[in-house]
Amino acid sequence: MTDRTEKAILAMDIGGGTQDILIYEAGETPENYIQLVLPSPTVITAQKINKVTQAGKGLHLSGTIMGGGKSVGAIKAHLKAGLPVTAEEEAAQTIKDDLAQVRALGIELANSPPPGFETVTMQDVDLDTLGRALGLYGIRLPRAVAVAVQDHGAAPSGKSNREIRFQHWKNFIEKGGKVRELAYLTAPPYLTRMQAVQKTVPGALVMDTCAAAVWGSFADDKIKERLAQGVVLVNIGNQHTFAVLLQGERIFGLFEHHTRLLDTRKLCAIINKLCRRELTHKEVFDDGGHGCYLDPETPPGFTFVGVTGPRRSLAAGQSFYLVNPHGNMMMTGCFGLVEAARHYGLLCP
């Protein structure tokens, strides 16, 4: 069996539609890294829950906080079918941070499944399954692991998770906006989804998916050439669209919106307003997005726009540059994770 555990990094960029996986090996060319694009954990979990629903059985949720989306939709469909749901507290927080709101949906909190209930484990990272699959091809997983997830942060009762997430970005820019400070060996307490990943995979470096895409874009030669003068980087994901005004390694401004609420016309209008430093938080937030923040010291001259992400077709027909690090756009976030892991010394000696 090939030993890829030394001087190697497992990078996992976990989105709402796919989980993009790459194994970096020191001395290997990027084109030959092992790369996978698989259904995201929330999609896989939703499929498991749907099978329980189809079987007409009670559902018990164990595990940790993970990405919602399709998995939460499947839980609600199970309840709508008149079938019971119980959940352990950490798993229940995937649905709502406030457990009173979880109970209000008709979900009972329980530490173990009642008789006859089927258990589904909630988790963003399943190294056992991945290791078994790659083991069939003679590949061992590296010991160094870096994972990106989209973390809204824990929202207290009465607060929108959009507000909490955007406060995180605003605070980051106000403190200097350095990209390299968006990777964590120990996730902040309020970033509960990242903390859950580190509970599942002790020692893992964690990042936000948006931050990983920004850092990964540096591997594109044209982006690298223009960083000193300033670039606009746009990551159009399956669920979220995120754009930054970046000069060097400093983010001066950004917006985040929900991709489902955007079409080409609206997306281009928002990007152009961001470039002109005219976009407001209220405009994005009131449209159902997370918001916008611009540092008062944001310089002019952001004209070069680079676009990446699985939904980048929304920007088709525009004069934007298509970011393509090492010739593989779907691995942009993974390349960012690898560079972050190397920066923080995660490579085995």
Image (cartoon, rainbow, N blue to C red):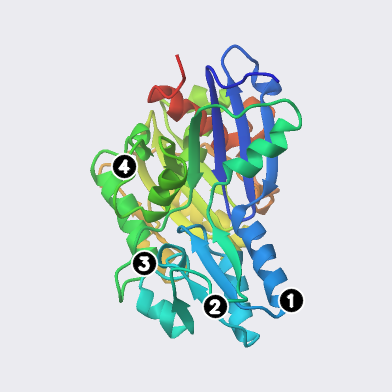
Label 3: few (<14), some (14–19) or many (≥20) C-alpha neighbours in 10 Å? some
Q: Looking at the image, is mark 1 or mark 4 earlier in the sequence? A: 1
Quadrant where the N terminus is found in the figure: top right
Cα gap from disc 4 to disc 2, whole angstroms: 49 Å
Q: Which residue is mark 3?
A: 282
Q: Looking at the image, is mark 4 or mark 3 earlier in the sequence? A: 3
Q: Looking at the image, is mark 1 or mark 2 earlier in the sequence? A: 1
Q: Secondary structure at mark 3?
A: helix
Q: Residue furthest bottom?
A: 82
Cα gap from disc 1 to disc 4, whole angstroms: 54 Å
Is residue 37 visible in this depiction of the protein? yes
Is residue 275 visible in this depiction of the protein? no
In the picture, measured across the screen, residue 79 lies left or right of residue 2, that is left
Q: Nearer the viewer, mark 4 or mark 2?
A: 2
Q: Which residue is mark 1?
A: 54
In depth, the one of 204 and 215 nearer the eye is 204
Residue 93's spot in the image, x, y percent? 42, 66
The disc labelled 2 sits on which kind of residue?
A: Val
Residue at 42%, 51% (x, y): give it: 196
Cα gap from disc 3 to disc 2, whole angstroms: 38 Å
Q: Which residue is mark 2?
A: 85
Cα gap from disc 1 to disc 3, whole angstroms: 43 Å
In the picture, measured across the screen, residue 282 lies left or right of residue 120, that is left
* Residue 65 quadrant: bottom left
